[in-house]
């Protein structure tokens, strides 16, 4: 519900945050369940006890898998940000290089106009 005191952008951001968190929670829950099933199978194959906590419990396996996944996601995100900055920003009208080129073109046009009118720029 949008109220007069809350701008639409804030409501959209709040809704986006909630949607992303819900999707993350569902994905994390799915990974936990699938990992638990895999953990049970491995423990049965090796004849080891099935524990949630403890020195060899599932919690440590789950945390390790989660941190490895986050590490790869952060590396991928960093690569996307770096490549976007290099490949998209450098040629855009907002980049410093484009502004320098535009200034050089303006000066060249001013010199041409000055030469045609007989006045020095």
Image (cartoon, helix red, strand yellow):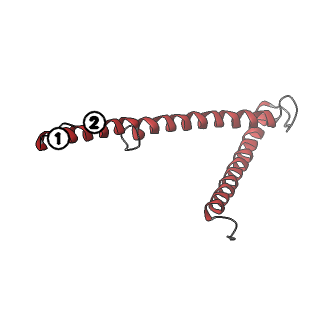
Under circle 1, the secondary element is helix
In depth, the one of 22 and 119 nearer the eye is 119
Front-most of residues 72 and 37: 72
CB within 8 Å, label 1 to label 2: no
Side of 45 where 99 appears, left or right:
left
21 lies above or below 78:
below
Across and down, in percent, residue 102 comes to 30, 40
- From this viewpoint, which residue is outermost toward the right? 54
The x and y percentages for residue 87 are 40, 37
How many numbered circles are shown? 2
The residue under the point 41% across, 43% down is 94
Query: Which residue position holds label 1?
Result: 114
Q: Tell me the CA gap for discs 1 and 2.
A: 15 Å
Q: In which quarter of the image is residue 60?
A: top right
Question: Would you call the spot at circle 1 few (<14 residues within 10 Å), some (14-19), or many (20 or more)?
Answer: few
Circle 2 residues within 10 Å: few <14, some 14–19, many ≥20: few
Q: Identify the element where label 2 is drawn.
A: helix
Location of mark 2 (residue): 104
Horizontally, residue 18 falls left or right of residue 95, namely right
Going 79% across and 36% down the picture, which residue do you hit?
44
Q: Earlier in the sequence, mark 1 or mark 2?
A: 2
> Whole-percent x and y of residue 23?
66, 54
Q: Which residue is drawn at 76% across and 43% down?
A: 36
What residue do we see at 42% from left, 40% from top?
89
- Residue 113 placement: quadrant: top left
**Where is the C terminus found, in terms of image quarters?**
top left
Residue closest to the eye, 56 or 89: 89
Kindly give the residue lying farthest to the top in the view shown: 55
- Classify residue 110 as left or right of residue 18: left
């Amino acid at each position: 519900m949008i109220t007069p005191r809350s701008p639409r952008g804030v409501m959209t951001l709040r809704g986006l945050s909630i949607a992303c968190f819900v999707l993350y929670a569902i994905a994390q829950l799915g990974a936990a369940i699938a990992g638990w099933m895999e953990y049970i199978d491995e423990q049965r194959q090796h004849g080891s006890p099935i524990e949630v906590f403890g020195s060899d419990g599932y919690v440590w396996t789950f945390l390790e898998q989660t941190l490895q996944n986050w590490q790869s996601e952060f590396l991928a995100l960093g690569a996307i940000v770096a490549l976007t900055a290099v490949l998209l920003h450098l040629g855009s009208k907002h980049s410093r290089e484009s502004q320098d080129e535009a200034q050089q073109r303006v000066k060249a046009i001013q010199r041409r106009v000055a030469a045609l009118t007989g006045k020095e720029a």
